[in-house]
Amino acid sequence: MQDHWLVRPSTIRLLWWVFAIILALTVLADLFVDHHSYFGLDGTFGFGAWFGFISCVGLVVFSKALSVLLKRPDTYYDE
């Protein structure tokens, strides 16, 4: 039986390349947009891309730290 086309390594590699090219073209398109910045920093090149990436990393770090505080022992429901 043949694997589904979305789980084949060649398809996954192709999708990574396609999404990376789309991301690069989107960031490059930022060169042709006239920005009306409100805070100064939001008018920089690729602001949406790098701000989104930093925000995502911050959320992951925050959730990992929060899980340390809220974690229950494995035997919590056995007691």
Image (cartoon, rainbow, N blue to C red):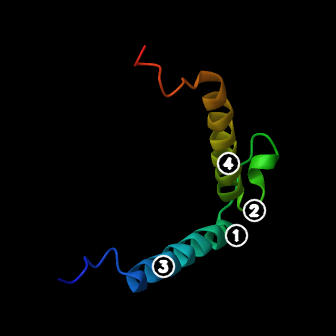
Q: Mark 4 points at which residue?
A: 57
Q: Which one is nearer the viewer's eye here, 47 or 33?
A: 47
Residue 40 position, x and y percent, is 82, 46
Q: Which of 72 and 14 is in front in this view?
A: 72
Q: Residue 18 carries which label?
A: 3
Q: How crowded is mark 3: few (under 14 residues within 10 Å), some or many (20 or more)?
A: few
Of labels 2 and 3, earlier in sequence is 3
Element marked by disc 2:
loop
Separation of marks 4 and 2 at Cα, in angstroms: 20 Å
Q: Which residue is drawn at 65% across and 29% down?
A: 68
Q: Residue type at mark 2: give it.
A: Phe
Where on the picture, by quarter, is residue 23?
A: bottom right
* Helix, strand or loop for disc 3: helix
Quarter of the N terminus within the rendering? bottom left
Front position among marks 2 and 3: 3
Q: Which residue is labeled 2 in the image?
A: 45
Callout 1 touching callout 3 (CB < 8 Å) = no
Q: What element carries label 4?
A: helix
**What is the CA distance from the residue labelled 4 to the residue labelled 1?**
25 Å
